[in-house]
Image (cartoon, rainbow, N blue to C red):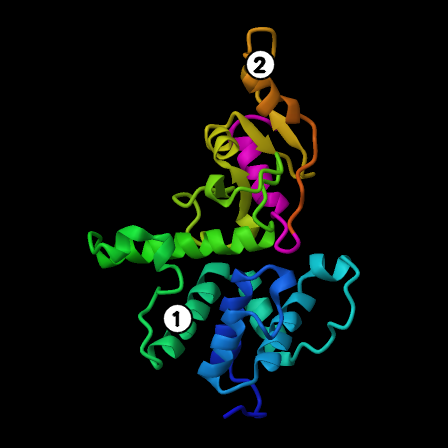
Amino acid sequence: MATSAQWTRKQTLAALHVYFQLPFGQLHQRNPLITQLASWIGRTPSAVALKLVNFASLDPQVRASGRSGMDHASRLDEEVWRELNTNWDAVASEAALYFEEYGQSQGISPGSDVLNEVPEIAEGRMTLATIKVRVNQARFRRAIMASYNARCCISGLAEPRLLVASHIVPWSLDTQNRLNPQNGLCLSALHDKAYDLGLITVLPDFTVRVSPQLKGAGVDGFTRDSIASYDGGAITLPERFRPDPAFLESHAKRFHFL
């Protein structure tokens, strides 16, 4: 039965977990993830959808887009949002845990929301620690794909099977921002590889810089057209969770672009 009682922290964080996975245009009461969570926590789909819109209202980038009607965030919403931006991975992990707990109460296994994206788990060949890493990676990908509407921010490629949720600061170098979509870019597999190798970077002003190694007379036509031609151009920014300039600066400095 739907309730009008105040939202608890556990319910709010479970809703935050769903928020990460959905593009802004899908924050409506008919979305299957929203209706699923509503049934788990005893609230109406419209109430859950409104909660997600409340989260969007706290994102400066979303507010700057001129969207109106988003001024109902509660004190708890604001508190959770502040905590999130202070320690992203801890709060995102807590949100996933509460979401999974609600699912388990309905007989749904933890991590099942991304199992189809991590086939090794389903085949049972991995340790529990590795499973957790893969599930977190899959959830990071979900957040990046949702923020960028499944489109490469450099080339515009929109084939999900050829897109990568690329960490700006690598997973191994920052244990506090592995799940933070502000530490990610949606890139084609080609541009992800070039970014990983330091052959391209995105500067803090969101423009692309290409290494001299991929420019000049000796470069083949494909490389020139598919990578070097983007030098100096601006990336397409996500609808929310804009990449943090500090992370971008770190990558650019690591590969001597700055």
Q: Nearer the viewer, residue 7 or 247?
A: 7
- Read off the residue under disc 1: 97
Badge 2 crowding class, 10 Å Cα cut-off, few under 14, some 14 to 19, many 20 or more, is few
Residue at image point 52% right, 61% down: 21
- Read off the residue under disc 2: 221
Q: Amino acid at mark 2?
A: Gly
Is residue 47 one of those drawn in magenta? no
Find residue 210 and report its image quarter. Answer: top right
Q: Position of residue 20 (x, y in %)?
A: 53, 62
Residue at image point 77% right, 73% down: 69
* Residues shaded magenta: 239-258
Circle count: 2
Q: Nearer the viewer, residue 170 or 46?
A: 46
Badge 1 crowding class, 10 Å Cα cut-off, few under 14, some 14 to 19, many 20 or more, is some
Instruction: Report whether residue 227 is seen.
Output: no
Secondary structure found at label 2: helix
| Distance from Cα at disc 1 to Cα at disc 2 | 49 Å
Q: Position of residue 66 (x, y in %)?
A: 79, 61
Residue at image point 57% right, 80% down: 45
Find residue 68 and report its image quarter. Answer: bottom right
Q: Position of residue 208 (x, y in %)?
A: 64, 31
